[in-house]
Image (cartoon, grey):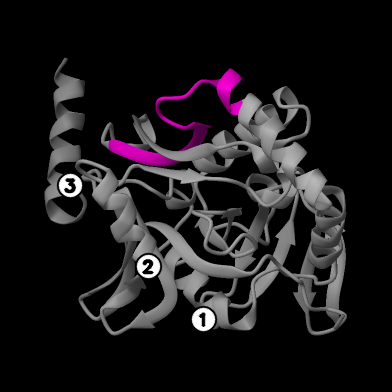
Amino acid sequence: MLKGLAITPPIIGRISIGRVVEKNGKRLPEKDDQFTITTQVQGRDGWHLHPVDAELRKANTGKLRTIPVRFLFNDADLNLRAEYSCFDRENGRPVCVGNGETCRRAGDGGIAELPCPSPDGCAFGQGGACKPYGRLNVLIGNEDEMGSFIFRTTSYNSIRALAARLHYFNAVSGNLLACLPLELKLRGKSTTQSYRSAIYYVDLGVRSGSTLEAAIADARELDARRKLAGFDQAALDAAAHAGFSNGAFEDSIEERAAVAEEFYPPESGGVDSQRDSHAQPNTPPASGLRGKLEQRAALLSGKAA
């Protein structure tokens, strides 16, 4: 195994909420209110749709807001890796990755291990350059039982919901997370930081029409069949852990530029880094001359009162 190269789950497709579009000569992320499943091939008009996308849309009425999935690993932290990450927006190169306690920071002298105070308390990551960055690997269908689809996000809501659900489902099933039939769900909410408009985040649940008890029963049956066939889940989890630990940074050189373009655009600022990354387009407070006039009028009105 090559040292310094993270060995990650094989990826056969991507799951996204939105796309990168060109506006006024700049490529900027545009969020959506449904899932899109693509291949790893990108053309002039964006990522090519994966055949699974069309199959799931036929089974759904309306927008694609649920995806039936299973997981590769029983260990929740292997399925979802979340870190505070700071990318160089010019070349897409990760420069600092931390977990809130320690971080790995790339510099002229190599990679240094340093304390990680989280983005709010770190001078190096101020200005929106450092965000929570999560990668979730899921299995869709049975065509490739070791080939996963990856969902990347910088959404606090998605990372928090997915991490909680993964650990909870693994606990209640008796460490059978990899055998549970589950589904990704797109949920909406509004906050003051989204200016009361809808933001969408990814959650995890039991498949529609089923119950938790039925899902656990199915997981036990699948686990029994796998053990009878000689499937070693513990060894698979151990191999994955060793692979992730083999490199300082997970994303490959080819993936870094696309990640930085979608999640770390040059326009990102401190306020944007605190908002959900899956926010629908909204109308922020007015700026420019109109905004100044409105602010002055409000100030004068307040004084008159």
Tell me: residue 182, above or below residue 24.
above
Looking at the rendered structure, the kind of residue marked 3 is Gly
Of badges 3 and 2, nearer the viewer stands: 2
Position of the N terminus, as image quadrant, is bottom right
Q: Is residue 236 rendered to the left or right of residue 25? A: right
Secondary structure found at label 1: loop
Q: Which residue is drawn at 49% across and 54% down?
A: 141
Whether residue 28 appears in this view of the structure is: yes
**Label 2 sits on residue:** 50
- Marks 1 and 3 in Cβ contact (< 8 Å): no
Q: Mark 1 points at which residue?
A: 90
Mark 1 or 2: in front is: 2
Closer to the N terminus: mark 1 or mark 3?
1
- Asked whether 155 or 47 is in front, the reply is 47
**Is residue 87 or residue 42 the one in the foreground?**
42
Mark 3 highlights which residue? Answer: 291
Residue 145 in magenta stretch: no
Residue stretch in magenta: 198-215
